[in-house]
Each structure stands twice: as C-alpha cells, then as structure tokens.
Image (spheres, rainbow, N blue to C red):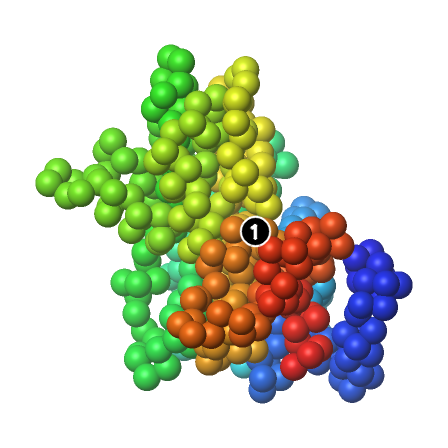
Amino acid sequence: MPVWFKQAYEKKKWLKSLQLAKHWRNCSPRLWESNMTDSGQLFLAVYVVYHPHFEQGRPIAQAVREHFNRSIFKNVSGGNDINVVYRDTPEPNSAAPRLIDLAEAETTAILVLIDSNLIEDGAWTEYLQDLVEQTEDKGLRTRIFPVLIESEATDLPDLPVQALRWYDWKGSTEQKLVKLIGNFTYEICRMLRHYLAHLKHLSEPEDGLQKYLEKVQIFLSHSKGDHNNNGEKIARAIRDRIHYRHSMSSFFDVHDIPAGLRFDKVLSEQVRSSAMVAIHTDSYSSRMWCRREVILAKLENRPLVVANCISNIDDRCFPYMGNVPNIRLEVQQADRIDFLIYRLLDEVLKDFLWQCQVRLHCPESKSSLKFIPRTPELISLASLPIRAGDEDADSVIVYPDPPIEKEEENLFIKIAPNVRLLSIMEWIAEK
C-alpha cells in the first residue's frame, strides 16, 4: 500500500476510499486491477515473451515491469500497476508457454525477445507465429513487438512484423535496455491513442492505419534571447537527436512555420497538439512567447517536461513551470537528451492512461467537473468553465493520486472556496 494512502487514512480523509478498496479486493482479485473497464475488462495488458534458456530474458522483463510499475503510472490509476505478465515457461505437458488471451484487455502490447534459443525451438517459433496471426486479426489495439537480440534472428521465417533490432544498437546492455523501454513506451502510446479515438468515435471504423502511423509531436519551447543563442542551440541539438534516434516529430518554429501564416496561430495550434519540452535557459522566463507557450500547455493539459539549462541565473523563475518533471540537461551529453525524450514519453503515456481512466469512469462530460492530468495548482482554476449566472455553483477538480497536502489545499480554499479538489480515488469512492 502506498505511503500516501496510509497517511490519508491516518488523517481520516480517506476512510470511505479505503473501505471501498477493501470491498473490491474481497469481491474479486480482478476488480482490484489498475485499469478495468465497466465490463470488468482490462484496458491495457502488457506481456513479455522470452525463451527460458535466454539468460538475459528475465532481467530485461524485470526492467520492463519495474518501469511500468513506477509511481507516475500508479498515480493515474488509483495506486495500482500496469499489468506486466511474463511468458517464459512451457505449460505442463507442452513445449510452449501458456496462450495469451487477447480478449482479456481492450489493448494488449506483447514484447517478444527473440534469441537463438527461441529460433532453434520449433514449439516456440510456432507459438510466435500464432501470436502474430492472432494479433493481426485483433486489429491495431493489439500489437506484437519482436525484439531481435541477435543478428541471426533476422533469418526467422514467416515474421512479417517490423522488429526492433537490439543487436544493431550501440552502447552497453543498460543503454540498450533504456532504448528498448523508450521505444516500447512510444508504441504503447500509439496504441492507447488509437483506443481513445475509438472510445470518442464508436461509430467510426477502427482500421485507421494512417492515423495510427502519426508520430508523437514534440514542441520545443525555447528562448532566442540568451547569450550566444544558448536556447536555440539546445533546441537544435534536441531536434537533431529526435530526428536521428527517435521516430518522433518536432516543432521548431524557425523551420516549421510555413511562410504566409500568422505565427501566433500556428504556435498556439502546435502547443494544443504536442507534448512540450520547455528549455529553461537564463532568459526563458523573461520572454513573452515562452511564458505564453507554457501557460497554454498547462491550460490545455498537455504533457510537459522542463529541461533545466540555466547557466548562471534566471532573475524571475516563471511560476507555471511547476508540478512537472524538471530535468537537468547538459546538452553535450547525448545520453541526457535521450533521457529527456524518454521521460517526456513517460508523460505522454501517463496522459493517455489518464484519459482512458477519465473516459471509462466519466464518459459524459459535465460542466461542473474538471479532470486534470497532474497535481492541481492555482492556474488549474483558469481552466474551469465559466457558467453565466451561476458563479457560485460548486465545481470539482479531479487529479491523479496522491491527495495534495493541507498547505496547498488551503490556498485553494482561500481563493476558490466553491471548488473542491479530489484525487481520482477519492472521487471514485464518492461516486
């Protein structure tokens, strides 16, 4: 049980929520899963498949599980984990592992580690081929992601699925593992984006491959007022790294605003559809457009990461860059840029998981109810709808766990006493 859950219980704030949690656990183990639809179906299941004789299989699988079981993902799903299940042991009286039930979840991501042990085992190669056919039949919400550990794996017949080429990546095993998890996270983002589009437009067909292929857009918010153009140089370095190493797209205004268009409209539209990296250099907070971009990203609930690139001093640190990851970036270190990009992808995945939770728990929007994907702050009040003639009506802001502490909550009580703040588990308990 998370520490914040215990603390909330001690303050007697979460008694009802705790009683509900115990009720779920007593009813059925599956009802305590982190990502259940109303029908009792998971909306995301993750599997890692590898041959039992592959020595690196278990450490890689454990790293994948640990990554997706971190608090940033638990907090958007009531303190529970993304289900990561291994398939590494043959079933009794069988040479192949247990079949994967693709009907168990709305979306299923299967990572298959292919080494020489798997290639040389006929039962396992047949199992892999069956998985490929089954996932293809289920459509774009169920995908298999082969990882070729050794170059010999390219000789595997009847594998019509694009694979990740572990053997071709440079660096140590640890560096390759970071890249693997980052790539896998990106592909899960694509799957959940596709799933959300289906939830929002149930009457439309699901086989929209063109929409699925759209890349995650990264908006590089930077200052052009730094000494030696530091902000622009860092933005270029990140942009080059994105294009060279990552299958994503970036927006860099110098290059990407078409001639003849109003730049303010283009910038605003790009912020609304992108994940943002705010490159915090010495002059960033003093630049009007940098401040506008961050405010808009917050109001639109866009995934946001701050790259701390202060070389000397920022005379006025912009207050609305809080409640998001803040990463120290030494641009000369390419690995730090990769770390920044992968951490932004985690924020994108967290946002999609949050949207799934909101869509499943509250399919119909309500003017008095606002869901935000991060800890609430005073700028969150600006995103509440203004209802004419109804200024005194109560509003509720629902946000990821854990509940905020009293000193922050008191600020909201002073400024907006008619606005209630509830973490997702508190809100579900009240429902």
Q: Secondary structure at mark 1?
A: helix
- Disc 1 target residue: 378
The residue at the far left in this view is 260
Residue 95 seen anywhere in this rendered image of the structure: no
Q: Residue at x 58, y 84 (%)?
A: 38
Q: Residue at x 47, y 50 (%)?
A: 298
Question: Where's residue 113, x and y in %?
Answer: 57, 54
Residue 270 seen anywhere in this rendered image of the structure: yes
Q: Give the side of residue 166 with respect to residue 77, left or right.
A: left
In this view, 351 is above or below 127? above
Q: Quadrant of the C terminus?
A: bottom right
Which amino acid type corresponds to the residue marked 1 in the rendered image? Leu
Q: Give the side of residue 310 with respect to residue 261, left or right.
A: right
- Foreground: 95 or 233? 233
In this view, 401 is above or below 141? above
- Foreground: 144 or 389? 389
Question: Where's residue 272, x and y in %?
Answer: 36, 53
Question: Where's residue 248, x and y in %?
Answer: 37, 45
Name which quarter of the figure residue 102 lies in. Answer: bottom right
Name which quarter of the figure residue 290 lies in. Answer: top left
Q: Residue at x 60, y 55 (%)?
A: 415
Question: Where's residue 322, x and y in %?
Answer: 57, 42
Q: Residue at x 57, y 73 (%)?
A: 394
- Foreground: 264 or 118? 264
The residue at the far top in this view is 228
